[in-house]
Image (tube, grey):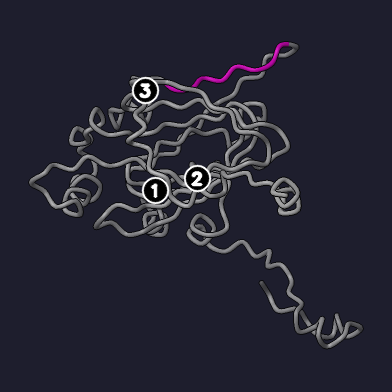
Amino acid sequence: MATPRTDLWRALSPEAQAALETRDYSSGTFGEQLAHRGLESGKVVSADRAAAEVQAVWIPGVEVFPRVIHPQPHRGSFGELARRDEGILAKIGFWPSQWAAARMFAQRAKGFHIHPPRVPAEIEPGAWFRRLFIDEAENYALRPYAEEQWDMMFFMQGRAEMILRDLRSGLKSRTMRLWVDGDNHRSSNNVAIVIPPGVAHAIRVESSEDLIMVYGTSVSFNPEFEGRIASDVETATLPESWQKFLDR
């Protein structure tokens, strides 16, 4: 927070002036916004991935690709999810083996969760990740999609904030924070997101309407692949006064 000018607030008491802060609306660099404040996903999609500043903050293996939502007057809209043999999914060779849908109620959040990467027993994890995502980053055939859970997420309704954090051994800890619009809000923020295992991800609903998602996974759902981190936001507790009343 920026320090306020004291001459603007001289009519307040000294205690109030000492406690006062003003919000900093400066945008910052691309990297600062993506890693800290959050960035509209349309700007993330249009960023030059080859630029040094973008590479410094981009989590290896994460993909953000645009979707086009076509209006259908008097009926609604039509939005494609993805095509297996075109675009980024064809390039990286990833197509889900299971599709699912999820709804999040308005003004709720899903805490960080993470899926375990599959690492060959004879290779140190850090060395494996550096080979996959740095040394041979374009060799997508190395990725064991069928043995670990990769997520691909689409947003059908509502608005969301998604936060990603790289927790893979041997890779730099990076954070990506982006805003995504559902199909009912046509904009450059209509995107899909691919998330590798080892990257923790959390979602907050950023509107007064429920968030509806469709997502594909590289393997079928397995509860053992669902690791929870800092997920206490999902626990809806009763107000303290209510609990005291019930405990009498």
Disc 3 residue crowd, few under 14, some 14–19, many 20+, Cα 10 Å: few
From the viewer's side, name the closer residue of 223 and 49.
Answer: 223
Q: Nearer the viewer, residue 223 or 14?
A: 223
Residue 49 shows which numbered tag? 1
Q: Residues within 10 Å of mark 1 (few under 14, many from 20)?
A: few
First of labels 1, 3 by sequence position: 1
Q: CA distance from mark 2 to mark 1?
A: 23 Å
Which label number is shown at residue 78?
none
Element type at marker 1?
A: loop
- On the image, which quarter does residue 147 sit in? top left
Taking the image as shown, residue 183 lies to the left or right of residue 145, namely right
Tell me where residue 154 appears, x and y as whole percent: 51, 29
Check the picture and name the quadrant holding the N terminus. Answer: bottom right
Q: Which residue was labeled with disc 2? A: 202
Question: Separation of disc 1 and disc 3 at Cα?
Answer: 19 Å
Q: Position of residue 140 (x, y in %)?
A: 23, 35
Q: Is residue 180 magenta?
A: no
Name the kind of residue labelled 1 in the image: Arg
Q: Residue furthest left?
A: 122
Q: Which residues are magenta?
A: 75-82
Mark 2, mark 1: which one is toward the viewer? 2
Local SS, label 3? loop
Vertical relation: 243 (above or below) 188: below
The label number, if any, that marks residue 86 in the structure image: 3
Residue extending furthest right? 11
The amino acid beneath tag 2 is Ala
Q: Amino acid at mark 3?
A: Glu
